Amino acid sequence: MLSRVAECIYWMTRYLERVENTARMVMVNANLLLDMPRGVQPEWEPLVFITGATDQFESKPRRYEERAVVMFLLGDRDYPGSAISSLRAARENARTVRDIIPREAWEQINELDLYARDHLEAGLSKRGRYEYLKRLILGVQTITGILSGTMSKGPGYQFLVMGRNLERADMTTRIIDVRSADLIEDTPALRPFSTIQWVSVLKSLTAYQMYRQSRQVRVRRSEVLRFLFRDAEFPRAVFHCASAVENGASRLPRNEGVLRQCGRIKRMLLDANVGELRQDALHEFVDACQLGLAELHVEVARTWFGHETTVEQSQVQTAK
């Protein structure tokens, strides 16, 4: 397989995953408004922090208010990580390899891109936001299902798997890092509501139901952290994602460097007592995870895409 084709497939699936992740973050934060006590509202600024796009948001005269943040994350065409921009990038990568991927997947990507642009104004309003976000999420899930169910499991599919799971692992670590720092359990009067915010962490990753099935205990910090970092079966847990990348790479040639880096990440996850880490230590651990994932991306690009990239470049969510 040509390195250009492999790279397009890899980035196509990363951008599709980013669309779903962004839509879920906005939806969960909006729904959190309904669950918090009167006078306490979730802030919108952390959503920008999660994406790592603070500088881009603040490059224009706008405040961290609901509509401004939602517009930035969903419809800002100048921000490469917005849902609109990510869908456009996914479509361009898919167009390049439309003779490789199933025709139905290409048609669904096209339709979702058109829907996202044509109905953006409805998505920015409180009345129409839920349906808009739901359509984006279900649209990406449909595409993912088509690719998984109809694409031959050859080299192209393995790059699809690696891109999807690297993006998932990166977003999981970002949400844990920012959301755990933003929790209210250290405020005595609001401590009873801390469970609601840990539930929102799980829901941001579509993890609440699977957490309850797996742990069969109430939602609490230590168990949530263990589940999201170390669970081997939940598709968005960091350990599972690293294992999926490892499995995909194992079916490709010249995979030694990528497999070594996957092994380092998995050992780091298993060696750390993540459930007992205090906030500062947790932040340092998340930084180490993100650095490991960035180095994994660098190794993938060096091995199969035929060009060098730095760790710093890999941590910037820019269009390919």
Image (cartoon, grey):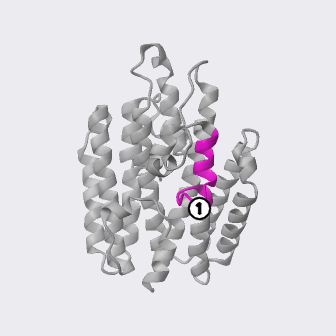
Is residue 231 rendered to the left or right of residue 278? right
**Which residue extends farthest bottom?**
2
Task: Residue lying at the far top in this picture: please name it.
Answer: 189
180 in magenta? no
Q: Residue at x 67, y 49 (%)?
A: 133
Q: Using the rendered image of the protein, determine whether residue 35 is visible from the camera's viewpoint.
A: yes
Identity of the residue drawn at 26% across and 71% down: 257
201 or 25: which is nearer to us?
A: 25
- Above or below, 282 against 119 in this view is above
Q: Which residue is mark 1?
A: 85
The secondary element bearing badge 1 is classed as helix
x, y percent for residue 184: 44, 24
Q: Which stretch appears magenta?
A: 67-86
**For this view, does 260 lie left or right of residue 248?**
left
The x and y percentages for residue 131 are 73, 46
Q: Position of residue 22 (x, y in %)?
A: 56, 50
Looking at numbered disc 1 in the image, what kind of residue is underneath it?
Answer: Ser
Determine the main secondary structure of the stretch shown in magenta.
helix
In the image: residue 205, left or right of residue 142: left
- Identify which residue is drawn at 76% across, 39% down: 127
Q: Residues within 10 Å of mark 1 (few under 14, many from 20)?
A: many
Q: Is residue 213 visible?
A: no
43 to 87, vertically: above or below: above
